[in-house]
């Protein structure tokens, strides 16, 4: 048993001893079907702490000849799969945690040389009868071990993309891609590798070199390749945890759901485990990643980025072209590149059918808020969010003039000059201005009510807070908006709140950009 070659099952034992363990072992059955097929090279890209390494530990424990894992797996779901006995501990395994190796390397420029030396040392310990040479490349080590033992390899590389994300010198980056090519696009070595499993945050780099890595089938945040249930927690798994730990499923859903990947919704596993252990839904993303990666890229403010961010913070979706991103950070040049990168990091979710993206849940929304505080060009936006509690108080207490003045500022700050006069832009500005109201209200745009659709409805979570109907007009007057609310009987949809219902009419002048506001208490 080695560190890199034919590792043991200790990591899986630690996971099984943990208080919360969600059994994803059926992945073994799925990936075993790919052994020695043209689909045997798999690259899985997901945000940090979404279960990629856990799956790697399952694979090492199952395939590695360096351990006996029969008893461990006999208690897991995979034990009932017909393929269970067929491949159990029957392969040589080469496992490389490239992220950990990079972090611990003192001289980053020597990382590939040092990696080869560490692997050579391990190969010599695991196969002492083979005379490995100092000049052997990594591909040579695998090929010679296969030739001598007649046993194929399962290759596992965790965080394969760390050298892409860390922006290492171009010559080292090219050498690394050449290394990958030598392992996975090598006709001589091909029979020696029964299966390869790479994990990362970013998909495989798409440039001239990448064409040599087209042997990989990729499972990404954009295209899961039928593996969506294994990375992150599913709805049924979350419901089971909520029952066990007496947590409210609806609350967990609001905080950690929102990742629609393939055909199912996927929940952030790391944050859910933290919530269960602490019996509290809160923002635990800080242990997954830093909001600074968001602020660093929105600071660049490529054309349309600011508008897109504001739209999404207003609970809207925005269109994104994901095909242009080449999965290299030095190639990020447009708004669509930024949004696609943030999708892969988990800060946004992508709907393949509509080709739209959005902020997935409450936890990530808080990360976006922290990012805005740190992005200088969003300073006024951050100030508006801080003032949103005050705006809600003013509206609830009928301070129409002050509300109108606040909307002057909001409409100007959150809307581009090109879209300023669209009613949808004013709607987005109002919803954004009332940002913190979401903790007290369900806010619905174009709410079906009476004989039409109210522009914005505020439905209180606590009936002590007043319900509100907001109707918008342009180049007319706020009284006309109030009149429409009454004539079209919009209050009918608020029949359970009629004793505490506010009618809010807003009119804005296209020329002066002044917002007039009238607030009335509903009278039966």
Image: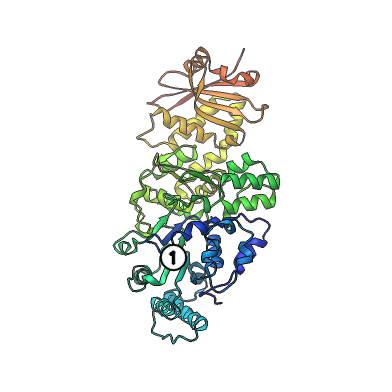
Q: Nearer the viewer, residue 30 or 343?
A: 30
Q: Quadrant of residue 45?
A: bottom left
Nearest to the observer: residue 166 or residue 384:
166
* Residue at 63%, 18% in the rendered image: 498
- In the shown orientation, is residue 465 left or right of residue 145? right
In percent of width and height, residue 189 lies at 36, 73
Quarter of the C terminus within the rendering: top right
Percent position (x, y) of residue 303? 35, 45
* Residue 151, above or below 285: below
| Image: 182 above or below 381 | below
Residue pictured at 53% horizontal, 60% vertical? 55
Q: Reply above or below: 94 against 25.
A: below
User: Can residue 183 be spotted in the picture?
Assistant: yes
- Comparing 480 with 66, the one in front is 66
- Residue at 50% from the left image edge and 47% from the top image edge: 372
In this rendering, is residue 71 above or below 394? below
In the picture of the structure, the residue carrying the numbered disc 1 is: 196
Q: Residues within 10 Å of mark 1 (few under 14, many from 20)?
A: many
Q: In the image, residue 370 lies at what x, y percent? A: 54, 49
């Amino acid at each position: 048993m080695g560190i890199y070659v034919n590792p043991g099952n200790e990591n899986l034992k630690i996971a099984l001893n943990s208080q919360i363990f969600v059994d994803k072992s059926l992945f073994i059955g799925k990936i075993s079907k790919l052994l020695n097929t043209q689909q045997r090279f798999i690259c899985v890209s997901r945000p940090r702490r979404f279960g990629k390494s856990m799956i790697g530990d399952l694979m090492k424990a199952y395939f590695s000849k360096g351990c006996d894992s029969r008893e461990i797996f006999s208690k897991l779901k995979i034990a009932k799969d017909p393929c269970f006995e067929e491949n159990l501990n029957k392969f040589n395994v080469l496992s490389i945690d490239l992220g950990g190796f990079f972090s611990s390397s003192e001289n980053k420029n020597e990382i590939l040389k040092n990696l080869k030396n560490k692997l050579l040392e391990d190969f010599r310990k695991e196969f002492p009868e083979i005379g490995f040479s100092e000049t052997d490349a990594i591909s040579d080590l695998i090929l010679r071990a296969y030739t001598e033992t007649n046993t194929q390899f399962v290759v596992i590389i965790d965080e394969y993309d760390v050298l892409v994300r860390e922006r290492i010198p171009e010559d080292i980056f090219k050498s690394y891609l050449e290394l990958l090519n030598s392992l996975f696009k090598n006709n001589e070595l091909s029979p020696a590798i029964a299966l390869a499993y790479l994990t990362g945050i970013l998909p495989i780099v798409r440039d001239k070199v990448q064409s040599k890595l087209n042997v990989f089938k990729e499972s990404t945040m954009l295209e899961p390749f039928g593996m969506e249930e294994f990375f992150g927690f599913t709805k049924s798994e979350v419901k089971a945890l909520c029952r066990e730990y007496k947590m409210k499923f609806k609350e967990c859903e609001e905080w950690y759901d929102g990742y629609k990947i393939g055909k199912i919704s996927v929940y952030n596993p790391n944050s859910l485990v933290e919530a269960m252990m602490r019996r509290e839904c809160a923002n635990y993303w800080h242990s997954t990643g830093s909001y600074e990666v968001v602020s660093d890229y929105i600071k660049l403010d490529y054309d349309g980025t600011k508008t897109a961010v504001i739209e999404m913070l207003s609970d809207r979706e925005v269109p994104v072209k994901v095909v242009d991103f080449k999965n290299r950070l030095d190639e990020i040049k447009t708004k669509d590149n930024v949004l696609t990168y943030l999708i892969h990091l988990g800060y946004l979710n992508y709907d393949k059918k509509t080709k739209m993206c959005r902020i997935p849940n409450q936890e990530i929304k808080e990360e976006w808020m922290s990012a805005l505080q740190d992005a200088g060009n969003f300073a006024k936006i951050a100030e508006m969010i801080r003032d949103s509690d005050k705006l809600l108080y003013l509206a609830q207490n009928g301070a129409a003039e002050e509300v109108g003045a606040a909307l002057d500022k909001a409409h100007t700050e959150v809307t581009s000059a090109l879209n300023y006069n669209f009613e949808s832009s004013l709607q987005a500005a109002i919803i954004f201005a009332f940002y913190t109201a979401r903790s007290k209200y369900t806010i619905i745009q174009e709410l079906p009510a009476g004989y039409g659709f109210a522009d914005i409805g505020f439905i209180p979570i606590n009936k002590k807070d007043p319900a509100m109907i907001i109707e918008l007009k342009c180049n007319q007057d706020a009284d006309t908006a109030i009149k429409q609310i009454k004539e079209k009987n919009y209050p009918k949809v608020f029949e359970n709140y009629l004793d505490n219902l506010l009618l809010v009419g807003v009119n804005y002048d296209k020329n002066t950009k002044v917002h007039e506001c009238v607030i009335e208490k509903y009278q039966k």
